[in-house]
Amino acid sequence: MITSSFHPPRRTLMGPGPTDVNPRVLEAMSRPTIGHLDPEFVGMMEEVKALLQYAFQTRNELTLPVSAPGSAGMETCVVNLLEPGDKAIVCRNGVFGGRMKENVERAGCEAIIVDDPWGKSVDPNKLEDALKANPDAKLIGFVHAETSTGALSDAKTLVKLAHDYDCLAIVDAVTSLGGVPLKVDEWEIDAVYSGSQKCLSCVPGLSPVSLNERAQGVIRSRSTTVQSWFMDLNLVMGYWGSGAKRTYHHTAPVNTLYALHEALVVIKEEGIENAWARHAHHHRALRAGIEAMGLQFVCEEHERLPQLNAVTIPAGVEDAEVRTRLLHEFNLEIGAGLGDLAGKAWRIGLMGYGASETNVLHCLGALDAVLGGMGADIEVGQAVAAARAIYGD
Ligand SMILES: *Cc1c(COP(=O)(O)O)cnc(C)c1O
């Protein structure tokens, strides 16, 4: 019989998510649970929506957190905007573009794939070719920050292209929200989704989404009902919509929403532009250390995400052994490679609360010690000093 409580170890989370959670967020989460229709709770929901509008840089009224992780935000956008038989163009330059294709096909639709190599941004020219070849496409979808490879794509240009060809654009901003500039209104993004556990540094389990008027119009003029009852935004808005009667749809994850509220207040206090700049700053220090060790990045500099650093594993080094030692000897988690990059790259996250000097120096020191100890072909003892030089220490 199991009679003792579970006490997780204290880790430093520098993988692709979940990331280090701000202690303020954990404290907020432990406050008393109240009813999900309690007027006090409903007031907090309105604040969550306003704070999300700030984070997304939008005035979209339809901005809310879906009660499930980022994958549910993806599915919500796909199943509400597409009807069976529709055609969608999906850009794939990593794992998550592939998931969007799966979602489109499972919604009974045709997915036209625009492939780009792993580690590269989505190529606007290839997208334009696909738009020209498929004038009947209803929407395009792409991943702004491809967490599987560390590549950033030019969302503004891709969305503009979609509109030039009369398509809607769905943007995966799971890893970009809070980490790099994302301007939903200025870039005229029609539908965007994110996740709580990446650069928002909240606990996992929520997926903020935002849809503009044009996307809402498409949903209103559907001729079929959304096949997912849980994700049907018409029903969800009966609970989340302003002025709505707040009818019961599902039991909102009350305490997780306290956590999101606090995480968003933290971002508001800092200022979203300052959060973007902080991620870039700590990325520069990490990069200096990685390069001083003689290691290489998967992505070229102009396509690289500051918050997700894919680093090529040096020849002869056993991937799993390094990650296991980092975890057991340094309480440090970094990410393994996914898909095409499995065994070939590590993914070092600098997201949200974890984008800090403490984490950068800890990670570089630990990698240096482990790789040096294994006799890997790196410059030993240089990394921390190189990063400290960036910090002016
Ligand atoms: C993490 C991630 C997802 C999926 O989010 P979950 O919260 O794991 O469901 C989707 N897209 C991208 C780009 C991600 O990084």
Image (spheres, rainbow, N blue to C red):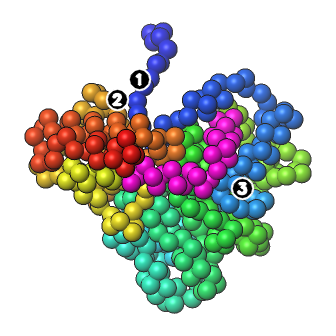
Residue type at numbered disc 1: Pro
> Residue 9: which disc?
1
Callout 2 crowding tier (Cα within 10 Å): few <14, some 14–19, many ≥20: some
Q: Is residue 317 above or below residue 62?
A: above
Label whose residue precedes the other's in the sequence (2 or 1): 1
User: What residue range appears in magenta?
Assistant: 256-284
- Left or right position of 122 against 187: left
Identify which residue, 106 or 176, lies in the foreground: 176
**Is 249 a magenta residue?**
no
Identify which residue, 56 or 96, lies in the foreground: 56
**Is 265 a magenta residue?**
yes
Q: Is residue 244 above or below residue 367?
A: below
Q: Position of residue 337 (x, y in %)?
A: 31, 51
Identity of the residue drawn at 66% across and 29% down: 28
**Quarter of the figure that contains the C terminus:** top left
> Residue 53: which disc?
3
Say whether marks 2 and 1 touch (CB < 8 Å).
yes
Q: Position of residue 137 (x, y in %)?
A: 57, 81
Query: In the rendered image, which residue does mark 2 sit on?
Result: 331
Identity of the residue drawn at 54% across and 70% down: 155
- Left or right position of 69 against 220: left
**Quarter of the figure that contains the N terminus:** top left
Q: Position of residue 256 (x, y in %)?
A: 64, 35
In terms of secondary structure, what is the magenta stretch mainly? helix
Label whose residue precedes the other's in the sequence (2 or 3): 3
Residue type at numbered disc 2: Asn
